[in-house]
Every structure is written in C-alpha cells, then in structure tokens.
C-alpha cells in the first residue's frame, strides 16, 4: 500500500495484512488513523494492533494482491530452503 492510499483509509474499512510469520493474508479493519510524534502515519486496527508507516508494504486494499505478495515471499523462502539443502550435501 502506498502512503497516499493509507491516508485515504476510513474507519471501518477492510484491508488485508500480510503476516510475516505465516505468509497468509489476514483481513483487518481500520479503527483510526493517527500520527506519531515524528509525523509518521499509524493505521490502528479494531483488534488493537496498528501498522506503522514503515510497514505499509505489508498492508493491501485488495485480497488478491495480498495473496500474490504472500505467494511471492513464500516461494522466495522455499528457494532459500532448497538452496540450503543443496549446500548441505
């Protein structure tokens, strides 16, 4: 998500967060937009979590785009694991 897209989010809007632990999309709901002391955007969610401006690449407006990003990251990890396996032989 771009910073401009993030600034346009509204309370109650659904979006998708790419979990860096599971590489699966989580549907999240925007609670409010706030700015920290340095003027950086924070997207607060209804589950009491928030996404700081530096992590906007993990947030998507569209579920399919989130899934594609998860798949790309997962494939990268699989490639790394396969290389590790080859290196250990």
Image (spheres, grey):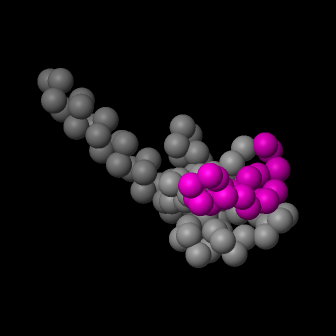
Q: Is residue 58 above or below residue 19?
A: below
Is residue 62 visible in this depiction of the protein? no
Q: Is residue 29 above or below residue 62?
A: above
| Outermost residue toward the top in this view | 88
For the N terminus, give its image quadrant. bottom right
* Residue drawn where x is 56% and y is 55% of the image: 38
| Outermost residue toward the front in this view | 37
> Which image quarter: residue 86?
top left
Q: Position of residue 16 (x, y in %)?
A: 66, 59
Is residue 30 visible in this depiction of the protein? yes
> Which image quarter: residue 13?
bottom right
For the C terminus, give its image quadrant. top left
Q: Nearer the viewer, residue 45 or 19?
A: 45
Give the prevailing secondary structure in the magenta stretch.
strand
Q: Position of residue 59 (x, y in %)?
A: 60, 59
* Residue drawn where x is 36% and y is 42% of the image: 78
For residue 30, side relative to residue 5 (left or right): right
* Residue drawn where x is 18% and y is 24% of the image: 88
Q: Position of residue 35 (x, y in %)?
A: 67, 58
Q: Which residues are magenta?
A: 28-48
* Residue drawn where x is 72% and y is 70% of the image: 9
Q: Is residue 4 above or below residue 45?
A: below
């Amino acid at each position: 998500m771009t910073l401009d897209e993030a600034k346009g989010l509204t309370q109650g809007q659904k979006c998708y967060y790419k979990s860096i632990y599971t590489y699966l999309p989580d549907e999240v709901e925007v609670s409010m937009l706030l700015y920290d002391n340095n003027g950086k955007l924070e997207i607060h969610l209804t589950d009491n979590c928030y996404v700081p401006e530096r992590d906007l690449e993990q947030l998507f407006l569209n579920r399919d785009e989130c899934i594609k990003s998860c798949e790309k990251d997962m494939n990268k990890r699989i490639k790394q694991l396969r290389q590790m396996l080859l290196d250990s032989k």
